[in-house]
Amino acid sequence: MRPFSYIRPTTAEEAVNAFADAEAGARFIAGGTTLYDLMKLNIERPTHLIDVTAIGGLATIDTSGDRLRFGALAPMSAVAADPVVAGDYPVLAEALWKAASQQLRNMATVGGNLLQRTRCMYFRNGVDGVYPCNKREPGSGCAAIGGLDRGQAVLGASGSCNAVSPGDWPVALTAMDASVEIVGPAGQRRVPIAELYRLPGDTPHIEFSLAPGELITVIEVPRETLEAGTARGSTYHKIRDRESYAFALASAAVVLEIEDDQVIRARIALGGVATRPWRATEAEAVLAGQRLTPERAIEAGRAAFRTAQPGRHNRFKLELGARTVADALLIAAERSRS
Amino acid sequence: MNTASFPDRARVDARDKVLGATVYPGDVPVARILHAMTVPSRIAKGTLTALDTSAAMRVPGVVRVLTPDDFPSPAPVSEDGPPPPPPTLEWRIAYRGQPIALVVAETLEAAIEGAEAVRPSYAPEPFAALIDSEDSERDPGEDVVFGNAEVALSSAATTVEATYVSPTQHHNPIELLVTTAVWEDGRLTIYECTQSSAGTRGATARALRLDPAIVDVKSAYIGGGFGQKGGIGQRQTALVAQAAMLLGRPVKIVMPRGQIFHLATYRPHSRHHVRLGADANGKMTAAVYDAEQEQSRHGFFPCAEYHESTCRLYGIENYRGTAADIRIDRQPPGWMRAPHPQAACFAFESAVDELAHKLGRDPVTLRLANDSRIDHRTGNPYSSRFVNECLEEGARRFGWSRRTPEPGSMTASDGTQIGWGVACGAYPSMMVPAIATLRIGADGSTRYAVSGHEMGQGIRTAIAAVLLEGLEIDPDRLEIVIGDTTAAPQHITAGSWGTAGAIPATAKAVARMREAMRELLAGREIAGNLHRQLSTVRRPFLQIEVSEVGPGQGPEALQALRRGAYAVAGPEYPNFTTMSYIAHFVEVHIEPRTRRVRVPRVVSIADCGRVISPRTAASQVRGGVVWALSAALREATEIDPRYGGYLNNDLADYVVAVNADIREIDVGFIDRPDPLANSTGLKGLGEVAMVGASPAIANAIFHATGKRLRELPIRIEHLL
């Protein structure tokens, strides 16, 4: 165990200032479900932990306005169980409750979940330095490329990294055009969720467009962009190697607006297949103004993977991913009718 | 023989386990304890050229770093003697993850930090991590041959031929490998979760050149064994024992799961080439089966045993089985639940299903028509064999007669493909000698000591069932002492012989005690239970000792037991062969688009002779089926041949089945005593429970889809 200091400020400002005062090696910590895990694996080696869980007002769930507002410290389990989320936004609720286990969802926060790091096995096996990893040790190489890449990304990979973005919740938020509020040394700003995540490129160790010391405080999901004001015609469909407690091999978040069997608008995002939460605009384009048939659903799914680049063992993700999108579309369509 | 069924009885330790009160070896409180952590090798083969421990020693709390120099050279190995103990610390590196140093510290945290601070230098060498790697060495084992299979195959009316593959898999019991060693007054006491307390004593004594008589081992409860905690001894044991003796303080280690993947045993990757022949009536006339498995350079997990069950599943008179080790640079594989038959019967029972399909025969009918009273390997009869009864009862419960034979013919209206599959399993039913002591006190206490280890299978409950059935004693003050070398001579508990070792001895102890009570009371009628009766006649206690051996065993088996040696009888006894059997019926549903496989129901009917403890027996079968599902659809250990070692070495990435994967499992027993195997008519169960359920799933998938999948695990990408 490596020594670190620990503080628990009570305001966001204090937390941000503490981060700025600390030398390199500071980390914010909330539920700890990722950070402690990675510390035990010696991948994260913070020297200062700034526990943000005592900051007041950041665990609020507010669904009364024209935007759903989730305080970053709200537990995943609480947001999943919120009556409005569970009733009117199945895409959000499902993305939360299909993740991890109840025990983890009770600890993990919806803000922290946005910053979960990859589950790439080569990344996580870092303790004795056997496997090179550009995320873990920039410039060391990538063992996953050309290696056991069944779980790796087929979309958005670079020559430096093909690690999958592991989350479910960020995928659902991407389909819902969510944004996050951030406070940091330079003040407050709002970032669309799509801009929070970076492609690996040559710098796969830089995963988020957050400056040092910036803290996510609120997640905002617009409801006014939805025809009905709710997203009942939505789903988060997650395909994995077992029925629970596993990361996605392929997943699809779908939000459908349908009128008289015609798709007015489809929003589709993919998980488990890409290096970041992946908005499938090509698939969305296939559906706009069309009748949603099983054939068109699979056509949309295939469109989502038109630019995909498989490795040695993950070619199946192209077909599985396309079918996952198709199933998700049909589930969402069924819900929008009822 | 008493043939009455035993009544249902709750687990005797259920309440304590639910309350968390059960004391596992890692929970035994020991004062002044030190904590140890191993340093694993990062190279897969070569030599450790230097070990800089100075930084580790500077970590506050670190007491000592043990290196290969702190251990005696390896014990000499004789051809016919016991297998060598696991190596201690060595300068030669045989596999990645091999422990190269042991850091001992006042706290666990300091031990971990110290282990990370050890600076080894290596001279690495090229290595072979997989069967197909360059530099792997083929090492043939003994053949199993009877009749003339090649001739019979060439004259068969119908033949099938295919190769089947089973992956590397790791046991992963929830309890990690835990050892505490205490050196006090010239005695070494080891608390360890081991299925073989006497084996641990012997291996530790040999590795450290100690007199085994000064070593005691206690393993009262194990949090899941599955063979990982039996077999060839655990590598950490002698390390912490040596540390305890050098430092004069108790030392404890809890091996991290990532390291356990790299140094404990595992189910080896294996390949099985099977050819079957049948005559025009569907009678199987020939089997030619070549098995090969990955093996360490000096490992001895025997490849020939792939044939133990397959050569006796049916009445095939012509059988030729070959087997080979493919030696590579990994740690030794070993016994993992249903060790050989899990993979062998996956291959063989898949091939039988292929044969049924090719013959146009129902797979149940084909199996029923190939039963046998004779073990053709020995020419002796089977002592009991109710595999057809298992098939018939299973088919009845499952509703097999409603199955339509054509693959893909049972597709539901939403496109879900439904498949019904069947497969059988067999496993040798073996027996071990036992020496037991039973003492009943006038104060209400009863103490019974016998050989056996409780890894959750329910041996304590089975023992209690026999004691409480036969003796009027206070169940609340019944103490069953097992897994303890100080209480009774201990044999390894594995191979499904635990019950066959403990229970006939227990039945004998009951009879002897009743006799002793009769003698004591000499015709007097005294009311009350045995404690009360003893009290009335003013006897503080009555104690008896009994011993029992397997058929064909004599006093030499008891001597072997006392020495802590391996003393297993069967499945080939002097005049008969004894096997346990099971038939599994499985329904699978396969989603139309994303092709997820679900297993909504399983019916499993076992012939394990007389059922001693119905509740734990049924639980054993359900556990076996769960694991067979997991082995068929989930589990594989990932090895990147460029680096060696195991990539998915935790419970997140080594995907085992979870509760949500498991639906209805209906378990039944034939419950008819074996007349010859032992005095209580029981046969082994824990292993056979798992055998055959994986191929039943694969066969059901074929029935659902028409796709024959011959490599495990079957995953979503194979069905897209």
Image: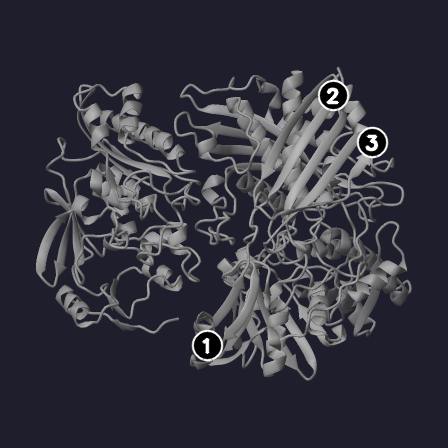
Mark 1, residue position: B56
- As measured in the structure, the alpha-carbon distance from the residue carrying label 1 to the one carrying label 3 is 65 Å
Q: Chain of mark 1?
A: B
- Residue B278, which numbered label? 2
Label 2 or label 1, whichever comes before in sequence order: 1
Question: Dividing the image into 4 quarters, which one contains the N terminus of chain B?
Answer: top right
Q: Quadrant of residue A283?
A: top left
Q: Do discs 2 and 1 belong to a common subunit?
A: yes
Secondary structure under badge 1? helix
Q: Do discs 1 and 3 belong to a common subunit?
A: yes
**Amino acid type of the residue that numbered disc 1 sits on in the rendered structure:** Ala
Residue B361 seen: no
Residues at marks 2 and 1 touching, judged by CB atoms closer than 8 Å = no
Q: Residue at x 29, y 59 (%)?
A: A31
Residue B228 percent across, percent down from the top left? 61, 55
- As measured in the structure, the alpha-carbon distance from the residue carrying label 2 to the one carrying label 1 is 66 Å
Horizontal placement of B158 versus A117: left or right? right
B310, B129: nearer the viewer: B129
Secondary structure under badge 3? loop
- Residue B373, which numbered label? 3
Residue B66 percent across, percent down from the top left? 56, 76
Horizontal placement of A304 versus A43: left or right? left
